[in-house]
Amino acid sequence: MSIEHPHPAPHPKQSYNSAGDGWTYLTELNAPNSTPEGEGRPVPEVRLQEKLDHATVIRLSFRNGDLMDDHHAPAPILVLAQSGTIKFTAGGKTMEIKPGTAVHVDAGNVHSLLADEGPAVVTLVVLTAQ
């Protein structure tokens, strides 16, 4: 006999992730930029990792010198360093984010990210209302 759950487990959109009843396991959060250094525009590679019920998880992979210039997010964000060092500027203050650190930014606040000490990867979590 099978039991149907009123809210079945979400199915991840990305094949490298997995999910169960009430949880999602995310992988490849620290994957490097796939474009060789010196090729293409000097901006990070942006990859949707997973869209969840109340958050969107995005990987930003920077090569040395890549810049994500001044911009703002429509919702609050949390930026967590996975590898390397990023110079993160918000509200006129520049901070270094590296593994073990994170920055939270309210919706609408202008900020920028720069990798000028080598490659770096951050996980961006866009927080959406419940």
Image (tube, rainbow, N blue to C red):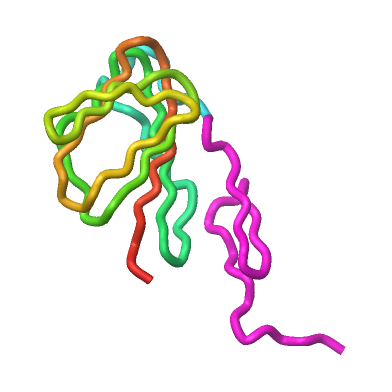
Q: Quadrant of the N terminus?
A: bottom right
Q: Position of residue 24 (x, y in %)?
A: 60, 57
Q: Can you give x and y, in whole percent of width and height, for residue 86 in the image?
A: 34, 22
Q: Is 41 located above or below residue 112 in the figure?
A: above
How far across and how far down the image is residue 102, in percent?
Answer: 40, 35
Q: Which residue is the extreme one toward the right?
A: 1
Residue at 19%, 36% in the rendered image: 111
Q: Residue at x 66, y 69 (%)?
A: 21
Look at the picture and state if 119 lies above or below 68: above
Q: Residue at x 45, y 58 (%)?
A: 51
Q: Mostly what secondary structure, the magenta segment?
A: loop
Residue 17: x, y in percent?
61, 50
Residue 13, above or below 103: below
Question: Does the magenta segment cover residue 2?
Answer: yes
Q: Quadrant of the C terminus?
A: bottom left
| Magenta residue check for 83 | no
Seen at 43% across and 31% down, the residue is 101
Range drawn in magenta: 1-30
Viewer-side residue, 16 vs 74? 74
Q: Is 27 positioned to the left or the right of 90 in the image?
A: right
Count of labels shown? 0
Give the left or right position of residue 107, taking residue 64 as reference: left
